[in-house]
Amino acid sequence: MADIVTEMMDSLISVGFATVKGTDIFPLRIQPAPDEQLVVIPTGGQLPILTVDSATDQPGVQVYIIGSDLSTVWTKANSIHSYYSNRKDTIRQAIWAARSSPIYLGKLEDGRHKVVVEFKIF
Amino acid sequence: MTDAISGMKGSFWICATADGLYEKLAEVSELRLKLSGKPIDTSNVDDEGWGSEIAGARTWEIGAKNNLILSDSAYAIIEGAMISGEDIFVKALSEGTPTVGAKGFGGKATVQGADLLLASTTAQQSASWTIKGRGALSKLS
């Protein structure tokens, strides 16, 4: 099983929210270019489900939507939030929105806008 | 350093026959064995105001919780017994397996209660079982 960041990036690409890893979607860190990009980071998620012979992860991810055009960034954030708000067998067994809407986090030092959407995964 | 035994060492094994191959119930999160005695009241006027009793019949039951694993062999046995009401044979172990270093208890039983969580927005699918003994409980060591 791939790590959850890779799985989320692969899914975002397959759905069409990004094109190629390392080009317009990145793991963990926001890049100086391109202007518009997605960044996926893990949140640590919830406590694993523990039994005497298994531990099942319940990871979480945040997707950062970055860009200088706020309208484009906000629209894309809402699209990603809406698409992944409640899906089964898309990423592992289920993914759902951890919050009711995207969150606007203001501007980066270079002036680009930053919006985050967060998801829980089983 | 304590001599306490980690709960992660416990396990619950099920078989459809007394001498068959016991299957481990997968992904157990809680396992309890309860023994209950039904006292016979022998209080009388010579007890000087105190009650008295003698031991009556004893019963035992096992409560088990686990994640619902539809492909699990032990689940298939217990599910079948839940529907049919037929006897099963169980081993509730503190340590070991039925064939290597078993420490625990075992006996013939029936599935008297099942509580299956089949859909939830906050939890995985799971099962809670109440398995009541039929006859004597045996110590395994």
Image (tube, grey):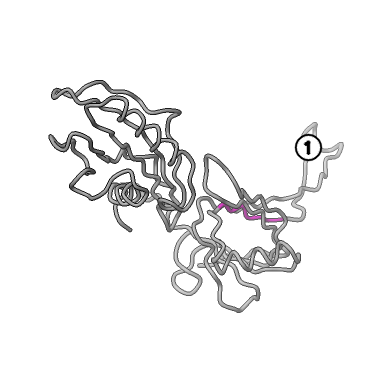
The part of the chain drawn in magenta is B59-65
In this rendering, is residue B67 above or below B80? above
Residue B73 x, y percent position in the rendering? 56, 69
Residue at horizontal 45%, vertical 40%? Answer: A96
As drawn, the residue found furthest toward the top would be A106
Q: Residue at x 30, y 56 (%)?
A: A2
Question: Which residue is under mark 1?
Answer: B51
Query: Dot 1 lies on which element?
Result: loop
Please determine whether, in this image, residue B103 is positioned above or below residue A60: below
Instruction: From the viewer's perspective, tell me whether residue B91 is left or right of residue A69.
Output: right
- Quadrant into which the N terminus of chain A falls: bottom left
Check residue B33 for magenta coloring: no
Query: What is the crowding at mark 1: few (fewer than 14 residues within 10 Å), some, or many (at least 20)?
Result: few
Residue B64 part of the magenta-drawn span: yes
Furthest residue in direction right, as rendered: B45
Q: Amino acid at mark 1?
A: Gly
The outermost residue toward the bottom is B19
Q: Is residue A63 left or right of residue A122?
A: left
Residue A51 seen in this snapshot: yes
**In the depicted structure, whether residue A41 falls above or below residue B141:** above
Q: Main secondary structure of the magenta part?
A: strand
Q: Position of residue B116 (x, y in %)?
A: 64, 51
